[in-house]
Image (cartoon, rainbow, N blue to C red):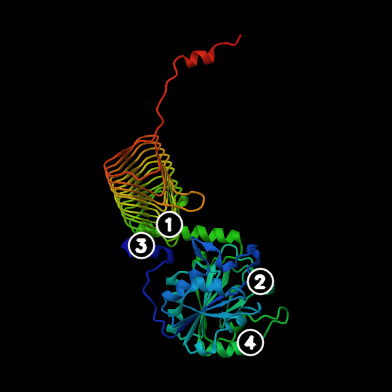
Amino acid sequence: MTRAARGARQGQDGAGRRPVAGRDLLVVVLAAGEGKRMRSETPKVLHRLAGEPLLGYPVNLAHSLGARHVVVVHAPGQGAAVKAVCGDCTFAIQDEARGTGDALNQVPHSLRGAAEVLVLYGDVPLLTVASVRALLQLRRRRDLDLALVTARVPDPKGYGRVVSAPAGFRVVEEADATPEERAVDVINTGVCCFRAEALWPALRAGRRSSVTGEVYLTDLFARMPRRATLEVAAEEAVGVNDRSQLAEAERIVRRRINRGLALAGVTVVDPANTYIDAGVRIEADAVVEPFTFLRGQTVIGARTHVGPFAEIEDCQVGRDCVIGRSHLVGSTVEDGVAIGPFNRLRAGSVVARGARIGSYAEIKNSLVGPESDVHHFSYLGDAVLGKGVNIGAGTVTANYDGVRKSQTVIGDHVFIGSDSILVAPLKVGDDAYTAAGSVITRDVEPGSLAVERAEQRDVEGWVARKRRPRA
């Protein structure tokens, strides 16, 4: 990973990747909520935030801490989708929504030997590594039974309030709060770290709510004689329960990403109007113009200039390139390439070193060789171009016969005249030419000129006769 990429990642999580000693740390990510307010067939924790599933954020955070085990508690029927996101984790199912305490109790007994337990949430994606590290250090330094993350927010409506008490603090749910307690602006984020010896007995002794039948983690806090809180920035406490909150989280993550890139030496001309996914890597001295979308696992090399209005997804782009207002997906662009506006590169395309793409070209599953030129209004499908090829305007590789797709292979230093149609399967040898307006259906030998035209015939006096008034 480049220094710029490391800087970008640090800007996203608020700290570097220095791991916390986690040999005795168990991290449990609670992700079994139904997410009804999302009004979606997609589970809430699998909705995308800056290109990554919500659930990926706490899981990645857990792994960065060096935890001995990471357990993801999910709802029934979500196992395959959750496992695809989480990778190297242990999975547990909460059969019914019986509260956060019950969800935590789904952790297999065989994994409960760790000294401390950190609880994260699949829909709280903005907590930084620095804050969680501070939480763990607080609990360890003071040998606490419980350390809880809180935040001071301008509008605490809907959240449990954290109220000061002689024993340290108490959490009051909004429905049970007095007017004075509702005025408190310090909220319970739910993120907490327990001393395992205090947690598991308290969880076994936990009682279900007489109203909802659920077991809440907050009910355990009162059983923890040694407890304290850690206040974090309000934006770290943002939970995602509906699409409006998802958009707010997106705004925060993108600001972090763009700031991290700027600190790593990347020029983001207008951060408020530039959209870069969390998985994107950009090297120093690159320039990203406004209204550019960089998605997926895209990599942009040093000194490359992108945009404005470019869309690049899952592409490898080299150094010293210029990419205009074009759409690239699943493609490789090598060093020193120039791609003008209004082009489309589809999956499987490779543009080799020093090649140039003009405008209004579409390239699909093709190799454009080094120092080659593809001019405007051209289509290359399933084509292989050698070095120094000239593709004239309006050229089409006719790769599909209605049943199968075939390849066009063009050798080095070939000149394809404007408005040529190359009917695959076809080979054009080195140093060959095709005449403008030709439909080439047979292989062209090296050094040859291929011409396919009907003989031109001029009809004298035709215009005058055409325009002569009728009697």
Front: mark 2 or 4: 4
Q: Using the image as rendered, state which of residue 43 and residue 181 is in the foreground.
A: 43
Task: Tell me the amino acid under the disc marked 1.
Answer: Gly
Helix, strand or loop for disc 2: helix
- Tell me, yes or no, if residue 146 can be seen here: yes
Left/right of residue 347 with respect to residue 182 in the rendered view: left
Q: Residues within 10 Å of mark 4 (few under 14, many from 20)?
A: some
Q: How many marks?
A: 4
Q: Residues within 10 Å of mark 3 (few under 14, many from 20)?
A: many
Distance, label 2 to label 4, CA atoms, is: 21 Å
Left/right of residue 210 with respect to residue 314 in the rendered view: right
Q: Quadrant of residue 340?
A: top left
Distance, label 2 to label 3, CA atoms, is: 43 Å
Residue at 30% across, 43% down: 414
Disc with the residue nearer the chain's start (3 vs 1)? 3
Disc with the residue nearer the chain's start (1 vs 4)? 4
Query: What residue does disc 3 label?
Result: 5
Helix, strand or loop for disc 3: helix
Distance, label 4 to label 3, CA atoms, is: 46 Å
Query: What residue does disc 4 label?
Result: 206
Say above or below: 381 vs 392: below
Outermost residue to the right: 211
Q: Position of residue 444 (x, y in %)?
A: 33, 43
